Amino acid sequence: MSRRLISIVVPCYNEEPTLPILYPELNKVAAEMPDYDFEYVFINDGSKDKTHEMLKNMAAEDERVKYISFSRNFGKEAALLAGLKNAKGDLVATMDADMQDPPALLPKLVSYVESGEYDNAATRRITRKGEPVIRSFFARTFYKLMRHMTDIDIVDGARDYRVMSRPMVESVIALEEYNRFSKGIFAWVGYETKWVEFENVERSAGETKWSFWKLLRYSIEGIVSFSNTPIHLASYMGLGLTGVSALALVFVIVRALLFGDEVAGWPSLVCIITFMGGVQLFVMGIMGQYISKTYLEVKRRPHYIIKDTNCEDSERNG
Ligand code: UDP
Ligand code: MG
């Protein structure tokens, strides 16, 4: 049997401080698995530091190193997609650059997929140690909401660190949607998943690229991409309020007929008007979310643009 190839896909955005830590670790893991060939696919997602130069130097000395540099920052999801599309491996691993996804777990993940029992082995953190409390709280709430609102199972604490078989990779890249939410996509394609748990590890160096607002946007993206519940909620709310106001109208008419008209009550009127205005704006906002997603989808723009790469036959506009 010919030797099997493992591709390790690593999205990098301003990872100059972490790459010199990650790369030797990857080599160490590769040395522990002598039965396999390795390739590292680094995606430079429009970094503003020396990440690109660093990758080029690594590639000059080590033919296992492949790099893909984007023309600007397209986001981690686009970087992952580019990596998966260009990875040649029989098995493909995706991993963060900052060592929060411990490379040392790789042999274990690979063995689960190679056993033939699972199509992919994924990881989840069982603790959120070292993370701001508020952030953990919102993250937990998000996963709970997600589970209620979609028919796919998105696991709390799931990371984008996993090893996939070639068929699963092909399925993931076959989903061409523009608004990519990987955690949802991995769950949506199905296949047998083995969950491997580990304790949270803090970033080795550099800073997190996720601000609170970026995370909030990301979670709205996740919900809107995989659930129609919010837009149904809008119709239910509209329906409910119409019913209530119809009843109230009957009540007011009957009362006026029986007891005559009362003049008082403008504060309550203002409250009701404000309330209705708020509900309408909220509902329009929900519809807007879906419309804007649709707008981006129908434009069929590429997910990313490659400025420079050493991958053979890669599509420049992917
Ligand atoms: N990343 C990326 N593009 C971005 C933001 C992040 O490619 O626009 C990469 C980043 O280099 C890292 C991974 O995504 O390898 C996770 O980012 P980070 O560690 O900042 O996120 P956190 O672990 O704090 O959630
Ligand atoms: Mg990180």
Image (tube, grey):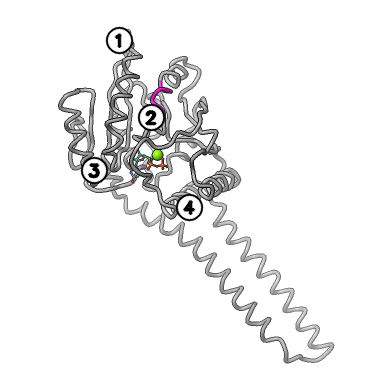
Q: Secondary structure at mark 1?
A: loop
Measure the alpha-carbon separation of dots 2 and 4: 25 Å
Q: Quarter for ligand 1?
A: top left
Q: Disc 3 designates what residue?
A: 70
Image quadrant assignment for residue 120 = top left
Measure the alpha-carbon separation of dots 2 and 3: 21 Å
Label 2 is placed on what type of residue? Val
Label 1 is placed on what type of residue? Ser
Q: Secondary structure at mark 2?
A: helix
Badge 4, how many Cα within 10 Å: few under 14, some, many 20+? Answer: few
Measure the alpha-carbon separation of dots 1 and 3: 33 Å
Count of numbered badges drawn on the protein: 4
Residue 186: give x, y in percent of width and height: 45, 35
Q: Label the magenta part by its dominant secondary structure.
A: helix
Residue 227: give x, y in percent of width and height: 53, 48
Q: Secondary structure at mark 4?
A: helix
Q: Disc 1 designates what residue?
A: 2
Comparing 166 with 91, the one in front is 91
Comparing 164 with 52, the one in front is 52
Residue 43: give x, y in percent of width and height: 27, 37
Q: Disc 2 designates what residue?
A: 169
Label located before the other in sequence (1 or 4): 1
Label located before the other in sequence (3 or 4): 3
Residue 220 numbered tag: 4
Left or right: where 22 falls relative to 221: left
Instruction: Give the magenta part as a residue range.
Output: 102-106
Vertical comparison of 156 with 109: above or below: below
Label 4 is placed on what type of residue? Ile
Quick one: quadrant of the N terminus? top left
Label 3 is placed on what type of residue? Phe
Quick one: quadrant of the C terminus? top left
Taking the spot 67% from the left edge, 65% from the top edge, the residue there is 240
